[in-house]
Image (cartoon, coloured by chain):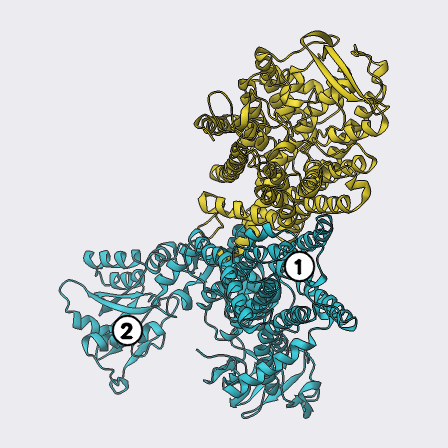
Amino acid sequence: MTGIPKPKVNPLAEKKMVMRAVGDSFRKLHPRTMVKNPVMFVVEVGAVITTIQLLWNALHHDSLIGFGLQITLWLWFTVLFANFAEAMAEGRGKAQADTLRKARAETQAHRLTQEGCIETVPGSKLRSGDVVMVSAGEFVPGDGEVIEGIASVDESAITGESAPVIRECGGDRSAVTGGTRVLSDEIKVQITANPGETFLDRMISLVEGASRQKTPNEIALNILLAGLTIIFLLAVATLQPFAIYSQAPQNIFVLVSLLVCLIPTTIGGLLSAIGIAGMDRLIQRNVIAMSGRAVEASGDVDILLLDKTGTITLGNRAATQFLAAPGVAETDLANAAQLSSLADETPEGRSIVVLAKEKYGLRGRDLSAHGTIFIPFSAQTRMSGVDLDGREIRKGAPEAIARYAAEHGNRVPAEVQKQVEEISNSGGTPLLVAENRQVLGVIALTDVVKGGMRERFDHLRAMGIRTMMITGDNPLTAAAIARHAGVDDFLAQARPEDKMALIRREQASGRLVAMTGDGTNDAPALAQADVGVAMNTGTQAAKEAGNMVDLDSNPTKLIEIVEIGKQLLITRGALTTFSVANDVAKYFAIIPAMFAGAFPQLGVLNVMHLATPQSAILSAVIFNALIIVALIPLALRGVRYRPVGAAALLRRNLLIYGLGGIVAPFLGIKLLDIAIRFLHLA
Amino acid sequence: MSANGWFQILLFLAVIFAITKPLGAYIARVFNREKTFLDPLLRPVEKLIYRSTGVDEKSEMRWTEYAIAMLMFSVVSLVLLYFIERTQQWLLFNPQKLANVGPDIAFNTAVSFTTNTNWQAYTPETTMSYLTQMAGLAYHNFTSAAVGIALAIALIRGITRREMKTIGNFWVDMTRALLWILLPLALVGSLLLVSQGAIQNLKPYVTAQLMDPQRITTTGPDGKAVTQTVTQQTIPQGPLASQEVIKELGTNGGGFFNANSAHPYENPTPFSNFFEMLLIFAIPSALTYTLGRMTGSQRHGWAVWSAMAIIFLGAVTVAYWAEARGNPQFAGVDQAHSTLQPGGNMEGKEVRFGVADSALFATVTTDTSCGAVNSMHDSFTPLGGMIPLTNIMLGEIIFGGVGSGLYGMVVFVIIAVFIAGLMVGRTPEYLGKKIEAYDVKMAMLSILVTSLVVLIFAAIAVIEPFGTASISNPGPHGLSQVLYAYASTVGNNGSAFMGLNANTLWYNTSTAAAMLLGRFFMVIPVLAIAGSLARKKTAPPSVGTFPVTGPLFTVLLISTILIVVALTFFPALSLGPILEHLLMAAGKAF
């Protein structure tokens, strides 16, 4: 798989990235940054409070210096670890942004003036509407539309794909991107984006996370976490009066420790890293999402609209069979079919030649010497063919050939008629071949479904996502291909407005719709769909209407996008569940430790048999800090998504992150307690 | 524990299970305005009510209008009760010539009955005239329950509606809840209770000669012991049966007499005891079926019911076990269950009910927001007493108050769906409704209220002299008393742990505040959720949708409730009942 030019993964670069992240974790300690994350902000405030208490104790030669120092340090570590997770997630994007910036390096543009002269200006001076000339070897100075000429362009700076692509005026391949390089020929480009608004600029700010906004689910999750934080703040704040009433007042280190252990620091610390990493995973797959909202929405998609051609089937129909009429040898039919197609440059025509060669060993012949006359296809006759050596060979639509044969009183044999119907019914396109107005047989053209599609659709079905094939074919043909490819449904004879109506209908019934598109006539539907993925090869209009751009221009990518969206949500859910479930064990560590002094009977709650009250509290705090670090890889990589139903997925994840979340800290805290006792730390 | 005790507990749950479907389906019909067998009788009455009050039964309300109507209704009802209490001396049906109720207690009571709490800081038989009981308190018993049902139905409508702004008409929902559900059931139930010996009259109190005169020794004003011989007993009378049924059916809990359902007139026989417990659970349990029926996911209704039933069974097991074990400090005393005695810890319990029925009643009355008692929770063993306390802290959602139990539970469902829902890789959905920031915010708000009020008021009460002065038992038991008082009032339960002198300025004010906060600050976010859900599209279910049915969901829901609540209250509980239990085992009592 190709990708955006990635920073080389060598130990040195990796080390540099980690170093940068470490620096960033300290920079992020600024309260103005921290306050955006209420859970970790509470931890930071707690750390500040214990620090002050520690200084006071030190000045007054009070007790608890050793214990207080350790607690305070671990509280600061907790905050730093969370910051580090975020910085690491951002790090990869920043490195990519640096690479992209190099591509944006200052270019010189040859601008056409009103008078038609060429002036050289810096690329940054170009405005939307300017027209520039770009010749071989030069960089395209800005995003634009080719208005004259054709050129091969190296777009590897954007797509990572080194093979050059063709850009020409008119049609769906007219868009060029700033920072790409023209390899041959010269094109006239009308600039469509002002500096700072170009695709490259947007991409840089996206991968850097500068324009990152919290997504709806993230906001909702933040509210939940803030709510839990308030509840635990309250539980701890009111515990002191209860403790005073019970004549067992607590010191500030213990209270802050309890608070920090209870509030959901694990998910609070990793939440933004998960979001950034999710976006990053998309970028790794060469998909640029215009907003995090779109990534999240892709996890919610209920129905995928897939264009038949290019997505489900290979680009064009191909000849797969020659069926001879009664009394005609199959090789004669193949021979005639090949002759009629030698001059036919359409993909269908070429596939006939290929089939004749592969199946019957008929090689291409040079026909120019025989005074041959090629009859091109015309909309009136709906036939094409060749006249040579007195042979008049024609191939074409069944009705057209039937009419052509009927002019000489010949009829289409009943067997052939039957085969024509069978091919049509099974989704293929039948072509009749006639020589001297005598029907020789049928060529079957069929769609070739891409390999592995059926399995992918089965996966999607298991996820609860319906697939719908969009095609211009007639319903009969569409149904056959749909059945063959394994999609759930199809829309036949689809016009752009039908697509639009379909999307609206599905949305009205509460479903989320995703689609891909590249043409200008796809733009309204791309804009209407909840997830619209535009192909990078597509028109500017399509790219602007969609909320994602696939740089590889691979329509099947939609399936991966959906998986990434789901993975993002699953990772958040899993770590939230884990974080909340963790609290059970922490209570059993800290509550007995707090009150075992005053009420030894409460020692029965010390189910982990932790050595001393101080080591119990310290173990809980250290576990709470280390679990953030331990989970950074999972947060960045994402929880694996399995294409199974929601019930199975929920059962599995609840078992791992729910039950696991309850059990893991019991083990972790116990081990830390043993280590602390071994090291005589408390 | 005895086989008979377990048989009664399981029989009780079985009967509740059996009535859930028919009653729930009936409630759904009532609010879907489908035909019911009572229509010929009640429809004319309903129409007459709307015509005379100017209610347009076809018009619908947005959630804000619904909330305002509910609040206005509550305020007017509150003021009405206050005035009846304050003027009862000059009004009818006061054979005992009881004086007007004092302002502070009148206000506390008005708040208490309006909020479906029925916290009673007074002794009814010496304070309230028959008119106050009938027109004031019984009226609230019906209407506050009807309000609860209306709110639950409004929330269910919010779940079922698609892209609509309205959630129903408060006045219509109230009226139908009263006419079709509460009044018919109360009528039939009252007759049944009368058959068991509950009284229903307007007679003056009766004086009876004691067959066995009692000698009572008290300390006189001069410090010397004074011995009196009591030969007469005053037996209060009144229109009791009609109020008794709605006390349970509406999960109100305010007793006609001070002894509540421990009084032989209120709860004469073991059968009446069983029947009263059924009345408490009947509507809350049925509403889970109504939820399933109206949302078209009957299996979701049963999943919610199962979660409630499992927590209920767990709680009653602990309570029964703790009470049946008896008091370890009575070593050598026969506390065993036998044909001659119920055994176990019988302090504060009626002999005609015994340990099993008392533990069951205590669990039932605190699972719901009822608060009627047939035994004194203060006298339970520490763990036995922790069950009622914890039940209330859960938010009274284990079946819960009429209506309030269901909407409280749905709030937890939303939290559970949101936390775990992300794990299936979609924006969390509840029955096709996406749970978004606004819904989470409202759900958290409504959960926050309970913990906020209980913890803050209790924390103040245990360190300030005006709070600690009322505590009758020192140590952890005193903490339990204070926690119970605020949990009970904020949860609109109204049962008292006893032992705490709550009739002081601080406690009267703070409990009144707790009752109002607990009722209305919970209800308004719930209505906001209803409005928000109604406005949303409904996504059709697919295999990718979060399943809110089946055992997995039930387990998830139970864990969410227990973890969220336990995490909030565990520190306080560990210094209260848990510590007391451990100290009791070590030979220390309070």
> Looking at the picture, does residue A328 appear above or below residue B226?
below
The amino acid type found where label 1 is placed reads Leu
- Please name the residue that numbered disc 2 is placed on: A352
In the rendered structure, the residue with mark 2 lies on which chain?
A: A
Describe the element under mark 1 as helix, strand or loop: helix
**In the picture, residue B384 is in which quadrant?**
top right
Nearer to us in this view, B220 or A329 = B220
Q: Where is residue B147 in the image (x, y as percent from the top left)?
A: 68, 30
**In the picture, residue A16 is in which quadrant?**
bottom right
Q: Position of residue A341 (x, y in %)?
A: 29, 75
In the rendered structure, the residue with mark 1 lies on which chain?
A: A
Dot 1 alpha-carbon crowd within 10 angstroms: few under 14, some 14 to 19, many 20 or more: many
Chain B painted colour? yellow
Where, quadrant-wise, is the C terminus of chain B in this rendering? top right
Q: Check residue A259 in the rendering and tell me which mark sits there, or answer none.
A: 1
Chain identifier of the cyan chain: A
Can marks 2 and 1 be said to lie on one chain?
yes
Q: Where is residue B46 in the image (x, y as percent from the top left)?
A: 66, 20
Residue A526 visible to the viewer: no
Dot 2 alpha-carbon crowd within 10 angstroms: few under 14, some 14 to 19, many 20 or more: many
The amino acid type found where label 2 is placed reads Ile
At horizontal 55% and vertical 21% (from top left) the residue drawn is B275
